[in-house]
Image: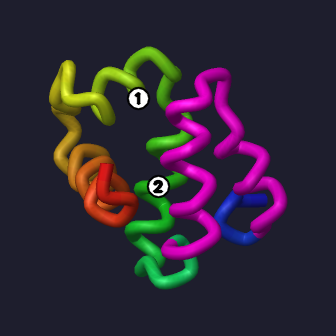
Amino acid sequence: MSLTDNKPRLRWACRRGMLELDILFMPFVEEAYDLLSEKDKQTFERLLEEQDPELFAWFMGHKVCEDKELNAMVQCILKRVKV
């Protein structure tokens, strides 16, 4: 079963080993996830498969994600939470 179809599992996948990532992901899932297109939901799910150090570097602007779809989702989340 996809995380897209199971909100509790999606919330669990958003709980990371870094508080900074939890602060980004949890409000996004609660407030914006349901408004995403199916394609964007799948992209978000793919983003959650990435390792915490990579995610942290992307969200803090230390690195740019080379995957255009994932990078667009990172930017969408940052814009949404206004970090």
Q: Amino acid at mark 2?
A: Phe
| For residue 8, above or below residue 22 | below
Residue 44, numbered circle = 2
**Left or right for 11, reference 23:** right
Residue 14 in the figure: left or right of residue 72: right
Quick one: label 2 or label 1, which is nearer the N terminus?
Answer: 2
Start-end of magenta stretch: 6-32
Residue matched to label 1: 55
Left or right? Give the position of 18 relative to 20.
right
Residues at circles 2 and 1 in contact by the CB criterion of under 8 Å: no
Q: Tag 1: residue type? A: Leu
Query: What number of labels is visible?
Result: 2
Relative to 74, say whether 15 is above or below. above
What secondary structure is marked by label 2? helix
Q: Residues within 10 Å of mark 1 (few under 14, many from 20)?
A: many
Which quadrant is home to the N terminus?
bottom right
**Residue 27 covered by magenta stretch:** yes
Instruction: Please report the residue visible at 63 percent of the width from the left and 69 percent of the height from the top.
Output: 30
Give the x, y percent position of residue 6.
78, 66
Q: Residue at image x 51%, y 21%?
A: 51
When asked about the image quadrant of residue 4, the answer is bottom right
Horizontal and vertical percent position of residue 23: 56, 44
* Residue 22 x %, y %: 60, 40
Q: Which residue is farthest right?
A: 8
Residue pictured at 47% horizontal, 55% vertical: 44
* Residue 82 against residue 6 in the figure, above or below: above
Badge 2: residue crowd in 10 Å (few <14, some 14–19, many ≥20) = many
What type of secondary structure mainly makes up the magenta span? Answer: helix
Look at the image and say whether residue 20 sits in the magenta stretch. yes
